[in-house]
Amino acid sequence: MKLVLFETAGAAAQYGVLTSQGVAPFDDLLDGDTPQARLQHLIDAFDSLRPRLADLAATTTPVPLGGVRLLPPVPWPGKILITTASYTGDPSQPLLATLKSPESVIGPDDTIRLPDVDSSWQFLPQAMVGLVIRGPAKNVSGNKWHTAVFGYTCVVDVMARGDQQFGRDFWLAKSDTLGPLGPCIVTTDELADPTSLRVRSRHNGSPAQDFLIAQASHSIPDQLQFTTTVMTLHSGDILACGTSQVGLRPLTDGDNVEVEIEPIGRLSVKVAAPVRSTA
């Protein structure tokens, strides 16, 4: 099942099932004052809600895609963890993870706004598979990893390259808008084996990254096990599962970046340079 957060003209954001005909809304089935709270309810109650969602998707007249604006399907995650898993086939490198803020999240067709720093800095759009967590997940053993995963989405982790003193590169990578995700969440009942996924990106229409999850230096179960030994992950958190450095090019003002992972879909975002003061 593909789940989206969307809005129409004059209406509040709501969740729906994405079909080939459009979006079937189901927000009235969810509790919560905010979209993120309703997502957490959806994740926690999904086993009981799934038959009703499937029925709605099959019988409801959908809202045509041309009349909706897709929003990030996880609008305000409590935690966004980015791992250092690579896709070179080298398991000897250590597995680490960094955090990004909820303010980094933007959705389809939104704009990455580059930090206001000097020209010695570069910002690289790293395509990743994102796990949408079903929690609480703590000390998740490798053979039970699937119990901690609600679904999958596309993630762009914009990473800074420049002065590494005091970790300034990782600090700048936490800037607002540098964590696009979407366009939907594909639930695990539709995608049981993430090792079959192929991650591809395009930069201004030209091929950029292209790698298979099966080539990961550390498997998804290993990444979940490692991260949950350090901290508890809760429903609606994101674990982004590393990237390949092959094909990356720095972002500049006016660029367009696309990440495509089937069957999740395509996430496309624009890039803008910061507006600097002329004073």
Image (tube, helix red, strand yellow):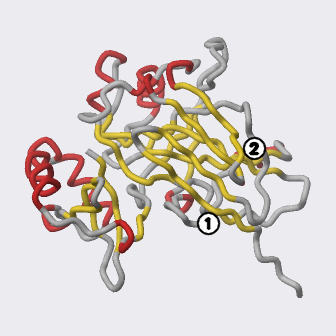
User: Residue 35: x percent and y percent?
Assistant: 31, 65
Quick one: which residue is furthest to the front in this view?
A: 21
- The answer to whether residue 73 is above or below residue 61 is above
Disc assigned to residue 167: 2
- The answer to whether residue 265 is above or below residue 195 is below
Query: Where's the C terminus, which quadrant?
Result: bottom right
Closest to the camera, between mark 1 and mark 2, is 1
Residue in the picture at 68% in, 66% down? 113
How far apart in space, not on screen, are marks 1 and 2 (Cα)?
25 Å
User: Residue 262: x percent and y percent?
Assistant: 44, 38
Direction from residue 68 to residue 87 in the image, left or right: right
Direction from residue 206 to residue 51 in the image, left or right: left
Can you tell which quarter of the image residue 85 is in?
Answer: top right
Q: Mark 2: few, some, or many residues within 10 Å (few <14, many ≥20)? A: few
Please tell me which of labels 1 and 2 falls first in the chain: 1
Task: State the residue in front, 268 or 187.
Answer: 268
Residue in the picture at 55% in, 35% down? 199
Disc assigned to residue 111: 1
- The answer to whether residue 249 is above or below residue 11 is above
As helix, strand or loop, the secondary structure at mark 2 comes to helix
Residue in the picture at 46% in, 48% down? 79
Residue type highlighted by circle 1 = Thr
Can you tell which quarter of the image residue 118 is in?
Answer: bottom right
User: Residue 124: x percent and y percent?
Assistant: 73, 47
Residue type highlighted by circle 2 = Gly
Task: State the residue in front, 7 or 121.
Answer: 7
- The answer to whether residue 60 is above or below residue 162 is below
User: Residue 33: x percent and y percent?
Assistant: 25, 70
